Amino acid sequence: MRRSGSVHARFPYNSRMRRSILTAVATLVPAIVAAGTIAVPAAAAGGGIAPPARVLAKGLTLDEAVARVEARYGARAVRAEEDREGERRVYRIRLLSPDGRVFEVVVDADSGEEE
């Protein structure tokens, strides 16, 4: 007689095994995220695999610019956008200071200089 449902027996996880798996995942995921982009070997880069966007873009990403400006001014970014001024790419970042003042900083996307 055939039983309904899965034909495979359930793997008998115990709480200690489950905890060790979760601990391994919890430590590996932040380490991978903190490492940033994964390096692409030179042989693979020419073989049709596109390098990460961060490698292609020159200058700062919007996230990097926001992090720099928040750290420099001790304020929290409430809005950030990419804009063009002629041929230049700039990031306009609106910040909220701890005392409630709102101000905007313009960062050149290629050089990282603030205006």
Image (cartoon, rainbow, N blue to C red):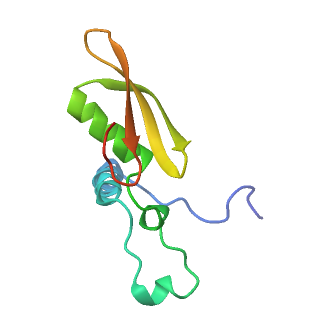
Percent position of residue 74, x then y:
22, 26
Up the image or down, 54 lies above or below 76; here it is below
Residue 80 lies left or right of residue 70; in this view the side is right
Up the image or down, 11 lies above or below 98; here it is below
Quarter residue 34 falls in: bottom left
Percent position of residue 45, x then y:
48, 82
Quarter residue 101 falls in: top left
Query: Is residue 27 or residue 108 the one in the foreground?
Result: 108
Percent position of residue 70, x then y:
29, 32
Please give the name of the residue rendered at 67% of the width and 65% of the height, measured from the top-left corner: 7
Please give the name of the residue rendered at 34% of the width and 51% of the height, measured from the top-left corner: 22
User: Which quarter of the rendered picture does the C terminus lie within?
Assistant: top left
What is the residue that sits farthest to the front in this orientation?
86
Percent position of residue 56, x then y:
47, 67
Up the image or down, 85 lies above or below 18; here it is above
Please give the name of the residue rendered at 55% of the width and 79% of the height, measured from the top-left corner: 49
Residue 29 lies left or right of residue 48; in this view the side is left
Please give the name of the residue rendered at 49% of the width and 48% of the height, measured from the top-left corner: 89
Q: How many marks?
A: 0
What is the residue that sits farthest to the right in this orientation?
1
Residue 75 lies left or right of residue 10; in this view the side is left
User: Which quarter of the rendered picture does the N terminus lie within?
Assistant: bottom right
